[in-house]
Image (spheres, rainbow, N blue to C red):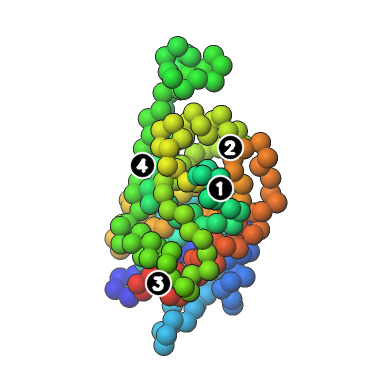
Amino acid sequence: MDDYECSAVILTAVEIETRSVKHLFKEWHKVHVRGDQQDYFETYFQRGDEEYKIVCCQQKVMGMTAATMLAAKATAAFHPRYLIMSGIAAGIGEEAAQLYGDVIVPDMIWDYSTGKYVGSDESEIRFGDLGFLPRPVMIHVDDEIMDIVRKTKDDPDNEFHVHIGPMACGSYVVANTELVDKRIKALFPKTVGLDMESYSVLYAAENAKEPRPKALIVKSVCDYADSSKSDQYQRFAAYTSSGYVKYLLEKCLPL
C-alpha cells in the first residue's frame, strides 16, 4: 500500500450518516489514538483475495471548522489513500432531474460564504438594505477520481443515480430560494448541491503532509434548500450516499 496505512477514512457530519456507513460495512472496532478524544472506528472489507482497512469518524458538531479539524486529524493519524465524506446535502440543480436520494459527487467545491457585506447600492446581490460582494474560493477534485466516477454512471452494477457538477459550501443551513438564487446560482449556475463541510475536507486533504490522500465528496439529496426543507428524507439520502461509497471502494477505486 505504498506509504498509506489504510484504504480510506470515511468522514460524516451527523449521526444518521454514521449509522448508515456502519450498517453497510460490518464488524467495526473502536480505535484509540493517543492524546485524541475523537472516536474512531475501523473495519475491513474484501476485494478479490485482498483485505482492505477503512476508518469511520464523525464530527462533534456540524460545519466547516469541525470538518477541517477532523479531516486533518484523521489524515495524520491513519494516512489514508482516500479521504471520503459521505452524507446528506441539499440538491439545487434542475429540480426535475434531482430526486430525493440521488447521489451528488462534486468535481469542484466553492465556498459561497466568503465575501463582504456592503450597502445595497454597492452590489447587485441585495437583501433589503444589505448588499453582498462575493469573493468565492474553490478547490477541484482529483481528475483521475472524477474520471472513475463518470464511468460509473454507465456501469450496470451501479444502482445509484449520480449527478456531477460544482457544489457550494457554506457555514450555515439554507432554507431560502432567494438566497440560493442570489448567492449561489448567480455565481455558478450549474451548481448541483449545497452543504456545510465539503470545502473543508478537500482543503485539509490538499494541504496535508505526505502521503497526501485523495479527497472525494459523496452526498445525496435530502432536500432542496427551500422553505419545504425537512428531515423526512435524510435517512434515505444517508443510505444512498454510503451505498455509493461502498460500491466505489469495493469495485472501482484503485486500492
Q: Does the CB distance between marks 1 and 3 fall below 8 Å? A: no
Q: Residues within 10 Å of mark 1 (few under 14, many from 20)?
A: few
Which residue is found at the position 59% from the left and 57% from the top?
Answer: 101
Q: Which residue bears the numbered disc 2?
A: 174
Which of the marked residues, 2 or 3, is nearer the chain's N terminus? 2
Q: How crowded is mark 2: few (under 14 residues within 10 Å), some or many (20 or more)?
A: some
Which of the marked residues, 4 or 3, is nearer the chain's N terminus? 4
Q: Which amino acid does label 3 sit on?
A: Cys
Which of the marked residues, 4 or 1, is nearer the chain's N terminus? 1
Report the side of 207 relative to 59 (left or right).
left
Q: Which amino acid does label 4 sit on?
A: Met
Q: Distance between the residues labelled 2 and 3?
A: 33 Å
Q: Indicate the position of residue 28 as horizontal and vertical percent values.
A: 58, 74
Task: State which mark lies toward you, 4 or 1.
Answer: 1
Q: Can residue 137 be seen in this view?
A: yes
Q: How far apart are marks 2 and 1 (CA)?
A: 20 Å
The numbered mark at residue 138 is 4
Q: 84 or 168, which lies in front?
A: 168
Q: Distance between the residues labelled 4 and 2?
A: 19 Å
Q: Which residue bears the numbered disc 3?
A: 252
Task: State which mark lies toward you, 4 or 3.
Answer: 3
Above or below, 173 relative to 100: above
Q: Which residue bears the numbered disc 1?
A: 96
Q: Does the CB distance between marks 2 and 3 fall below 8 Å? A: no
Give the position of the C terminus as an image quadrant.
Answer: bottom left
Task: State which mark lies toward you, 2 or 1.
Answer: 1
